[in-house]
Amino acid sequence: MGISMNIIIAILIFSVLIIIHELGHFLLAKSNGIFVTEFSIGMGPRILSMVKTVKGYRLRGFMSTGDFTAANRELEATIYSIKLLPIGGSCMMLGEDETVEDERAFNKKGVWGRISVVLAGPIFNFVLAFVLALIIVGMRGYDPAKIANVTTVAKEAGLQDGDVITRIDGKNINLARELNMFLYMNPLSEASVDLTYERNGEKHNATINPEYVKNYMLGFYYDDGNKAVVKEVMDDYPMKNAGFQNGDIITEINGVKVATKDDIINYFKEKPLSDKPVVITYQRNGAENSANVTPKLSGQGYSIGFALDGSRVKTSGFGVVKYSLAEVKYVIVMTVDSLKMLFTGKVKANDLAGPVGIVDMIGSIYKDSAPSGFVTVFLSLASFSVLLSANLGVMNLLPIPALDGGRLVFLLIEVFRGKPVDQTKEGMVHMIGFIALMILMVFVMFNDFSRIF
């Protein structure tokens, strides 16, 4: 897919996320009797505006600041605008950043009404994430923390392939990704791990004493089906260096015939990879070839003796709602945990992705899912949109000036003080915060360009 199409899809996704966010502010403002001066999509100069007259709505082209002010004063109705730059959006309210002697002004409303208006934007993003998750889970199912490839310490604790982990060290687990994130945030050590798992509808408890292991990889991904086909080979890994290509069909491993992906998985389950060479026989364009591949040490550390299946399982009824909520919760928790890692130095600032990086990710998602058809493309982009929408909600709740969270801080101060903070001083703080955010955005975009190009 060309870069232009990447940008078009990204603009569509960003627009939906931002419109939903601003719609939350808009609807709660209206319900609290606050006059919304402008509801806009995009940033920069207005290129198209719709204003209300006594005869109804009419469209206008470019509207200057003076025209805009006059329209608000004369018509006393919300102006709906599309602006030049297709990023961002706004819901401008009367008396939001200045004291206005009008009963419809934001500053004239009760503090809890204003808090509801500010909170509505992020909450609407969480609601959008949930709606998208309902579609995804309803069509594709969810990924239970189903055990696969049980080895020594897990076997000794009584676990079997197919068991589903529901709790680890006191934390409830609904998804395989939740368990992976928990283990990432809480690295294993010599300390024992307490698990709760389900088998045939019954719950069991187990305690595992992690073992220190070395992990080796050949460096390839399987086909999406159950064929013994190489879907992709990883750069700087043995399979790539040995000359394997996408589409190669693996037929034998060390002389043992394999016909499916499960055959390969079962072979390495019985004979785990080590630093010893593996002879792999494969077919390409009808011709048979063999190669000696020496696995690469990909990591070492403590293990609880099993992997996760990761495949999705269909559900219905209440299960769709339950696991859709679990999807949104997972993304929110992951976002918060990522911020913690950023502030503690576990994640570097250079790893941040901005609009350019997101456009590149969208292009990669489309490229990888397009061969499987429209439904797969839609669900893949919807899944990414769940991540973006929940991220937008969390980021806007951060207590940073110029963001919704920054405004909430001042409103909560007002709750405890019994009177509002001087709006001039608050506006100055938000202005400084806005400038800082713009500087951060420039930094992130520079990182995006340097990483991609």
Image (cartoon, rainbow, N blue to C red):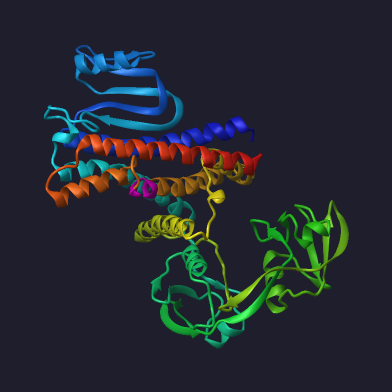
In the image, 329 versus 189, the foreground residue is: 189
Q: Is 291 placed left or right of 317 in the picture?
A: right
On-image quarter of the C terminus: top right
Query: Residue 125 is drawn in which quadrant?
Result: top left
Residue 394 shown in magenta? yes
On-image quarter of the N terminus: top right
- Total number of numbered labels? 0
| Farthest-out residue, bottom | 156
Residue 406 shown in magenta? no
Q: Which residue is drawn at 11% across and 48% down?
A: 418
Above or below 407: residue 306:
below
Q: Residue at x 75, y 75 (%)?
A: 274
Query: Residue 212 is drawn in which quadrant?
Result: bottom right
Residue 105: x and y in percent read 17, 30
One can see residue 124 in this view: no
Above or below 193: residue 61:
above
Q: Is 452 placed left or right of 76 in the picture?
A: right
Residue 407: x and y in percent read 27, 43
Residue 183: x and y in percent read 51, 70
Q: Is 435 placed left or right of 176 in the picture?
A: left
Residue 268: x and y in percent read 71, 73
In the image, 187 versus 423, the foreground residue is: 423
One can see residue 318 in this view: yes
In the image, 7 versus 420, the foreground residue is: 420
Q: Is 406 placed left or right of 132 in the picture?
A: left
Above or below 233: residue 254:
below
Q: Residue at x 46, y 51 (%)?
A: 136
Q: Is the magenta stretch mostly helix, strand or loop?
A: helix
Give the magenta-colored segment's residue range.
393-399
